[in-house]
Image (cartoon, helix red, strand yellow):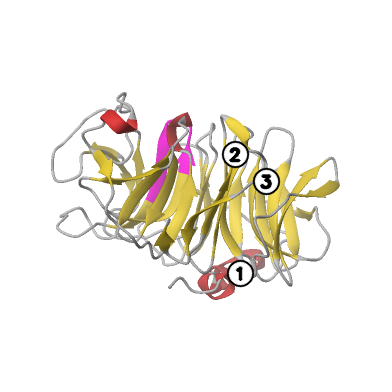
């Protein structure tokens, strides 16, 4: 099972504390080369690369989101991607990689992680991108040397924040920023607390990035150089930027989703008492009333009406 969020980010905490003190090539997985990956135009039900899944269990989720401005909820799992659409779960026919640090963007997704069973892709994957639901992968760097567990990528800007936990050919340990996945600059993270839960990039403003922590939500408007708190002293485990507000997950005696707009916090109706921490949260960019969140016990909840009604898509690892 996935470890508790504080434990998961243990290595990240050490890196961030240290920060405060102080060859791109596109390829198709399974060895077929593709110079310019293109977005798959077929609908999911017509896709030859995805089929309805027979899987009954999901463990080790590493991210959720809506890649490519589709209405498809993508779930990155230890055994490869799953997609939920209109009551049906789909799995990939191939390239079932362990996508760590999964980040949905407007034309696909960015990720890192490890190749799936039978693959001879480099291990670790380094930084990769796909624009066709994972059918082809563009290698952006660090193949065979880095596994970025924690990434933040702007949905429209595609600006990248990468937490590097082990020195590689271009980076020392720390948090780095890039606009093009080629030139990387380390960010200072001034004003952040000692413990950090996650990092989140604004979808359209490449200067804005947020950090969640046990002490609240912190915002930067200078690409991570400095941060200021924007919530009261409470544990925030995940968040998502919307056009004019933020939705974040607060953890106390129970987990609660909160909408933050113009400094005012408004609770969002929850499916029931959620005792476990919310580790992943996403909103459909095409419909802000469609919200999904994943909890540390392996459950996934979904609403299409901003919380008025909820469906449990995964119950403690079991697909419903």
SS label for mark 3: loop
Which disc number belongs to residue 307? 3
Q: Residue 276 versus residue 198: which sits nearer the camera?
A: 276
Q: Is residue 105 magenta?
A: yes
Q: Is residue 191 visible?
A: no
Q: Residue at x 52, y 39 (%)?
A: 159
Q: Residue furthest top?
A: 41
Which quadrant of the structure image shows residue 100?
bottom left
Q: Horizontally, is 297 left or right of 140 in the view?
A: right
SS label for mark 2: loop
Residue named by callout 1: 276
Q: Is residue 93 magenta?
A: no
Which quadrant of the structure image shows residue 40?
top left
Task: Return the disc, 1 or 2, that comes first in the chain's sequence.
Answer: 1
Asked whether the residues under the numbered discs 3 and 2 touch, taking CB atoms below 8 Å apart as contact, a structural biologist would say no
Q: Which marked residue is nearer to the observer: mark 3 or mark 1?
A: 3
What is the magenta segment's predominant secondary structure?
A: strand
Counting from the top left corner in percent of width and height, residue 19 is at 60, 64
Q: Residue at x 66, y 37 (%)?
A: 242
Q: Horizontally, is 45 left or right of 208 in the view?
A: left
Gap in angstroms between the C-alphas marked 3 and 2: 7 Å
- Which residues lie in the magenta part? 104-111
Residue named by callout 2: 304
Mark 1 burial class by Cα count in 10 Å: few <14, some 14-19, many 20+? some
Counting from the top left corner in percent of width and height, residue 71 is at 47, 33
SS label for mark 1: loop
Mark 3 burial class by Cα count in 10 Å: few <14, some 14-19, many 20+? some
């Amino acid at each position: 099972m996935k470890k508790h969020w504080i434990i998961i980010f243990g290595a990240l905490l050490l890196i961030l504390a240290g920060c405060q003190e102080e060859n791109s090539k596109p390829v198709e997985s399974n060895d077929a080369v593709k110079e310019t990956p293109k977005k798959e135009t077929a609908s999911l039900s017509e896709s030859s690369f995805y089929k309805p899944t027979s899987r009954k269990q999901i463990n080790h989720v590493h991210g959720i989101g809506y890649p490519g401005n589709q209405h498809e909820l993508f779930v990155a799992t230890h055994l490869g991607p799953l997609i939920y659409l209109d009551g049906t779960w789909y799995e990939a026919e191939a390239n079932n990689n362990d996508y760590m640090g999964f980040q949905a963007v407007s034309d696909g997704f960015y990720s890192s992680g490890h190749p799936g069973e039978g693959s001879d892709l480099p291990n670790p994957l380094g930084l990769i991108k796909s624009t066709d639901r994972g059918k082809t992968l563009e290698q952006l760097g660090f193949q065979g040397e880095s596994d970025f567990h924690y990434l933040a990528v702007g949905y429209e800007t595609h600006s990248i924040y990468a937490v590097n936990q082990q020195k590689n050919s271009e980076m020392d340990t720390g948090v780095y920023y890039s606009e093009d996945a080629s030139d990387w600059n380390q960010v200072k993270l001034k004003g952040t607390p000692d413990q950090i839960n996650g990092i989140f990039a604004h979808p359209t403003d490449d200067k804005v990035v947020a950090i969640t922590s046990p002490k609240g939500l912190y915002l930067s408007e200078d690409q991570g150089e400095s941060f200021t708190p924007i919530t009261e002293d409470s544990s925030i485990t995940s968040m998502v930027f919307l056009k004019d507000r933020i939705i974040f997950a607060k953890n106390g005696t129970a987990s609660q989703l909160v909408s933050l707009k113009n400094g005012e916090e408004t609770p969002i109706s929850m499916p029931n008492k959620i005792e476990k921490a919310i580790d992943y949260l996403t909103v459909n960019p095409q419909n802000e009333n469609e919200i999904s969140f994943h909890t540390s016990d392996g459950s996934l909840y979904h609403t299409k009406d901003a919380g008025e009604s909820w469906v449990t898509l995964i119950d403690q690892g079991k697909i419903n």
